[in-house]
Amino acid sequence: MSESARPLTSPSEMRPVVLCFSGLDPSGGAGLQADIESIGQSGAHAAIACTALTIQDSQRVHSFEAVSPAMVRQQAMAVLNDLPVRALKSGMLGSVESALELLELRQRHAGLPYVCDPVLVANSGGSLGNPAQLLPVFHQLMQVATLITPNSIELRALAGCDDLSLGLERLFELGAQAILLKTAHEANPARIEHRLLIQGTLAYSSYWPRLPGEYHGSGCSLASAIAGRLACGLDLLHAVQQAELWVHQSLRRADIPHAKGQRMPVRFVTSDSAAFRQ
């Protein structure tokens, strides 16, 4: 019997849990489904405090409705009081009030690794909150996060400048602990660079060939895959390295819903589905 199929013999054997604050994407490409699949493949278990219900497809976000802050808090406390939470992860927060609930919770659980994906705008287009209102709260969250994972657009918004290197410096001045910068939105046609900086020092750079098309949920998948590995006990550098490799593989085998839609990462592959794709 495989390890993943082994029945639990006692509660102490439950996989480590990542508590995710994220929105529901009905297309399944991003948001909480991306969290669940990405964390599950890392060996951890995903629990969700749903922050918003969205209307979106593989092309764009059409609208969203934030979950009440009280409901977000109650979801999170139900999980924390019952399951062995070993890490936190946040993506779409829906409202400033829910973001402040997360900030308060994080301050009460400061010993847990926390990966913050500072989601402001969906890759497919469309708002996921009010950036002007959310930015100050993200500045507070990044001070208490183990890692933030902005793409270049989000970095510029958070730092208030166009130069990426200067933007990284500014975020560390504002209190960031570690930053994984993703540059898929930049103009380089051949490759994508990721830069991991810890306490302002470059710890790791990686370069990935630019795959054809656009991808729905790649950022959610990467942040969640890192959080899952941190929950399982990996250090930050190795969690990032392993998660990047896994995400690249999931993008290479992505589904294409139709000619105009963004591609959907295939985050979970069984032996049957792998054979089907050969």
Image (spheres, rainbow, N blue to C red):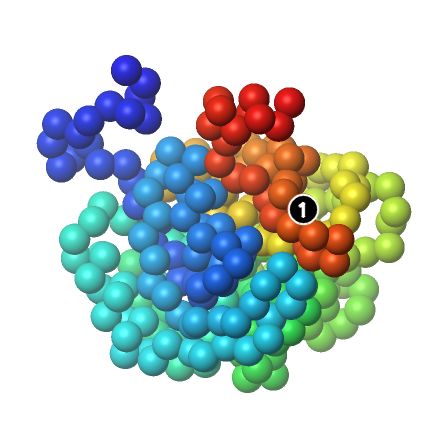
Residue 246 in the image: state x and y as whole percent.
Answer: 57, 34
Find residue 234 and report its horizontal and vertical position in percent: 43, 34
Rendering quarter of residue 75? bottom left
Q: Tag 1's secondary structure?
A: loop
Whether residue 216 sits left or right of residue 76 in the image: it is right
The location of residue 65, given as percent across then percent down, is: 45, 79
Residue in the image at 49% along x and 71% along y: 54
| Residue displayed at 64% across by 22% down | 278
Residue 20, image x, y percentages: 39, 57
Q: Nearer the viewer, residue 125 or 58?
A: 58
Q: Name the residue under label 1.
A: 256
Q: In this view, does 97 lie above or below 36?
A: below
Residue 41: quarter of image: top left
- For the N terminus, the quadrant is top left
Residue 56 can be seen in this image: yes
Q: Is residue 245 left or right of residue 167?
A: left
Left or right of 252: which side holds 166? Answer: right
Residue shown at the point (68%, 69%) measured from the top left: 125
| Number of numbered discs | 1
Which amino acid, by three-letter code, is at mark 1?
Ile
* Residue 196 appears anywhere in the view: no
Q: Nearer the viewer, residue 101 or 248?
A: 248
Classed neighbour count for the residue bearing mark 1: other residues with Cα under 10 Å, few (<14), some (14–19), many (≥20): some
Please determine whether, in this image, residue 170 is positioned above or below residue 16. Answer: below
At 59% across and 63% down in the image, what residue appears? Answer: 57
